Image (spheres, rainbow, N blue to C red):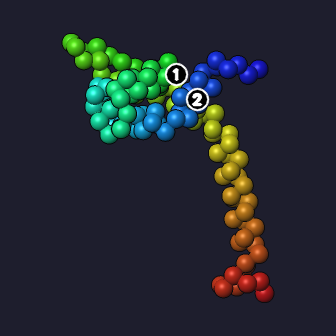
Amino acid sequence: MYSATDPLSTTLSALADPTRRALLARLSEGEATVNQLAEPFDITLQAVSRHLKVLETAGLISRGREAQWRPCKLETARLQEVDGWLARYRMFWEGSFDKMGAYLEEITKGDQNGSKN
């Protein structure tokens, strides 16, 4: 049964925002502080912190503690869960494209210009 608080829903909700996806993309390059993450955005540090909190709650990032720094780090387990969930749909589309490719090959068989003999 569906629950609004299940991990997949929480993850997909966090990924729904383009700013959060951009923050994750940056973190895929390595750890970064809030100030480093905020640099390319035309939003306040407070807004970036709120986005990071959503990502942290969803389990997509973690925050360390090094002296006065709290570097953010990408956590991949939840993204792997999303990928696993999408895998069955990926298999469906790949199967559909394979069938379409076979059909197109069949109807164009025998003529290099693509028209049927």
Kind of residue at badge 1: Ala
The percent coordinates of residue 72 (x first, y second) are 34, 24
Q: Marks 1 and 2, Cα distance to the nearest angstrom?
A: 9 Å
Hey, which residue is sitting farthest left in the picture?
A: 67
* Left or right side of 29 for 12: right
**Residue carrying label 2:** 13
Pointers 1 and 2 in contact (C-beta within 8 Å): yes
The percent coordinates of residue 95 (x first, y second) are 70, 52
Kind of residue at badge 2: Ser
Residue 45 position by quadrant: top left
Above or below, comparing residue 68 to residue 26 in the picture:
above
Going 29% across and 18% down the picture, which residue do you hit? 70
Above or below, comparing residue 31 to residue 57 in the picture:
below
**Residue carrying label 1:** 58
Q: How many labels, in total? A: 2
Residue 64 position by quadrant: top left
Q: Nearer the viewer, residue 50 or 111?
A: 50
Going 35% across and 29% down the picture, which residue do you hit? 44
* Left or right side of 41 for 91: right
The percent coordinates of residue 117 (x first, y second) are 78, 87
